[in-house]
Image (spheres, rainbow, N blue to C red):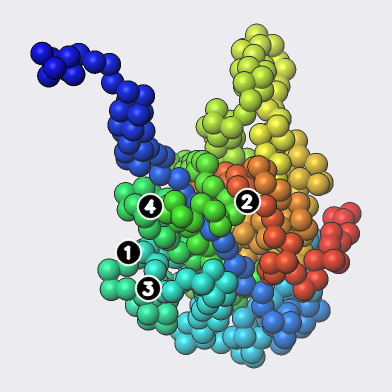
Amino acid sequence: MLAYMLDIMPLSLSQILVPTILLALIVWAVFWPNHVYLVDFVCYRPPDNLRVTASNYIEHFEVLGGFDVSGVEFQRKVLERSGISDEACMPLGVHELPVDGSLDRTRQEIELVFFQVVEDLLTRQRIRPKDIDIVVSNCSLFCPTPSITSMIMNRFGFRSNVKSVSLSGMGCSAGILAISLARDLLKVNKNSTALVLSMEAVNPNGYLGKAKSMLLANTLFRMGGAAILLSNRKQDRQRAKYRLQHVVRVHTGWDDTAYGSVFQDHDDDGYIGVALSKALVRVAGAALKMNVSKLGLLVLPYSEQIRYVRSMILRRWTDGRAVVPNFRKAFEHFCIHAGGRAVVDAVAGNLCLDQDNTEASRMTLYRFGNTSSSSVWYELAYLEAKGKVRKGDRVWQIAFGSGFKCNSAVWKRISEADPYVENAWSDRIHRYPVEVPSLS
């Protein structure tokens, strides 16, 4: 009888709560979202002795002797209108006469940039090289053997089972593409860290011919690079700067005009260069429109989405233009790839952004030039150096690249800013913003 009574007696509160709490903890551990955190990033700051002033640039072209008068004059005019200052730098091989675009010089450029930023990043975060689980590098026009990731692994002594990928030929949007790949790898590799490296090798890619579409690249690209540390480890949540919220990628390579808008080829005299077509800005605008139509559904408040859809419906029966959604309601900060003044102007016009929204992009172009895939990181570093990014702020990185591609990454600041952390801008951030000469 006593045993029977015990069986039917109600359970105590502790007997109910303890198993329930244990079950909840197990469910939390198994099904908790596998967030990707941006722990920290470092951008390369070239030494001042590698600066290239506009006057020295033109003199260099003239002394080389390979350009005709019209070619030199064309590059001078583009430089004047480029929005790039005399502070932007070139690797050592480009300073030499004749220009040394050899394999050795290019490897030295890669090592100079990547070895420095990786060492700075690991040291600042007190991370051993053997704690890195994934390495992803991107460099579009230089693809050596062994690969760039192998160069990094050899220099720092990573583990033998580290997962490494080297991306090439992906253009200026490859930095966000590398973030996308690292995110996907972190999704299937729990409790891991990823090192992402982004840059473009300038040294071997100078163009010595006469085609104006290829001469443009000579005047825009400068040296630079970035190292980014990502993690999905829960213990890194406390020290991480940002959480990755979205990555949206658009590829318009199916269209012949878009495919040929940024194209590496031989000219009529056999010189190799990268041609930038006159349709580039229009192609970039079309790719951006496709990208924001997907991203908008993820980030815009419902009021803006309804406003945009209503305008599209009304447009069927009227000649009116579609309303541009107000992305300033979704983001506090914008990092537009500093591919050139025309690119920044076009994006700002399409998204109805003001000077404050594009300040980081214009100042990055002014000081560092077009550093290709790493430019969006120099822009984020600028915003941090200015103390503009606060906890809870959302940042939109927008990048364009050959193919033609438009890629977006959305980050949310999850920690308070540390005003004492130095970055590539810290030595002279007090001088910025500066007045950039107008095009007129």
Residue under circle 3? 130
Instruction: Name the residue at 76% across, 51% down.
Output: 388
> Of the residues under marks 2 and 4, which one precedes in the sequence?
4
> Of the residues under marks 2 and 3, which one precedes in the sequence?
3
Residue 432: % across, % down: 84, 62
Q: Amino acid at mark 4?
A: Leu
Residues at circles 1 and 2 in contact by the CB criterion of under 8 Å? no
Instruction: Determine whether the residue tagged by mark 2 lies in a helix, strand or loop.
Output: loop
Of all residues, the one furthest to the bottom in this rendering is: 97
Q: Is residue 29 left or right of 316 when viewed as pictured?
A: left
Q: Amino acid at mark 2?
A: Ser
Residue under circle 2? 415
421 is higher (above) or lower (below) than 110: above
Callout 3 crowding tier (Cα within 10 Å): few <14, some 14–19, many ≥20: some
Callout 4 crowding tier (Cα within 10 Å): few <14, some 14–19, many ≥20: many
Residue 168: % across, % down: 43, 63
Marks 1 and 2, Cα distance to the nearest angstrom?
29 Å
Residue under circle 4? 186
Marks 4 and 3, Cα distance to the nearest angstrom?
17 Å
> Of the residues under marks 4 and 3, which one precedes in the sequence?
3
Residue 326 lies in what quarter of the image?
Answer: top right
Q: Amino acid at mark 3?
A: Lys
Q: Amino acid at mark 1?
A: Lys
Marks 1 and 4, Cα distance to the nearest angstrom?
11 Å
> Of the residues under marks 1 and 2, which one precedes in the sequence?
1
Residue under circle 1? 163
